[in-house]
Image (spheres, grey):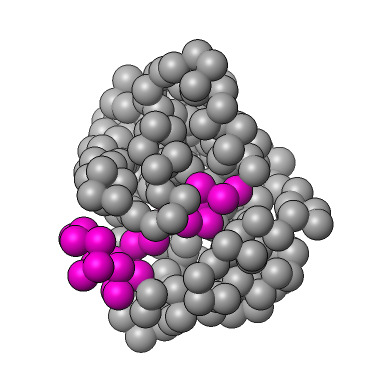
Amino acid sequence: MEVLAERVQTHARDLGATFAAFADLRALPKEVRKGLPIGISLGLALDPAIVTEIADGPTPAYAAEYERANRRLEDIADGCAALLREGGYKAEAGRPTVGNVEAILLETHLPHKTVATLAGVGWIGKCALLITEEYGSAVRYNTVLTDAPLPTAEPIRTSRCGSCEACVLLCPVDAVSGREWTPDLQRDDLYDAFACLDHAYDLVQSRKIRHAICGMCIAACPYTQRYIERARAAPVGPEGAST
């Protein structure tokens, strides 16, 4: 079990992942996890030099980084799934959220951040982004579902945001409610996804970018700021960051 886990994590890093963590999904409905009990949370940290530039909104460089991360995460998930299938296990590679969002509800059947919290990667922030201790919310995610016997982590079930309201105060459309996350909360309890998306669509024209993205709350997060400061002190690319 441990040998297989190390092989998967090494393979994921070789393909460009910042980290790979394992979650027990058996408490979730079978239909959302395709009947498979294990989720592999794949994370790719965004370039801190680019993230630091989006405090006032997205830039063309950030949009390009967003695309790069999504493409790389597709390849990483495909590669990890192929490795597991070669070993005789079932494995289904996911796609980054941009390709899975339901147009009406703006939600996914199995959010990558849900798998990440169950894998002990981080918690959900007040702006509904996943926050990690090491990279803040400057991470893109993908998921592989499998029946491989991988050792799973202890889930994170409590927020570590505390009294921080950086993302609440910064949001230009007041989309963030300010409530602190617990696993039983619904997305709408945390933030207004439609207000956020409407603003992001406005930015497509005003910022001349291809995707409806904002990113201001990513840059505002104190955990993200610590990631940026560490990178300034000892510059490394997001894929070369320690895990």
Q: Is residue 92 left or right of residue 139?
A: left
Residue 173, image x and y in percent?
50, 76
Residue at horizontal 47 percent and vertical 61 percent from the top: 111
In magenta stretch: residue 203: yes
Residue 105, image x and y in percent?
41, 82
Residue at horizontal 47 percent and vertical 33 percent from the top: 20
Residue 14, image x and y in percent?
32, 20
Q: Is residue 87 above or below residue 187?
A: above
Q: Is residue 56 above or below residue 186?
A: above
Question: Which picture quadrant has residue 132?
Answer: top right
Q: Is residue 113 left or right of residue 123?
A: left
Question: Which picture quadrant has residue 139?
Answer: top left
Residue at horizontal 51 percent and vertical 47 percent from the top: 219
Of 100 and 219, the residue lying toward us:
219
Q: Is residue 83 above or below residue 242?
A: below
- What is the span of residues highlighted in magenta in the rendered image? 200-221
Of 29 and 74, the residue lying toward us:
74
Q: Is residue 29 left or right of residue 97?
A: right
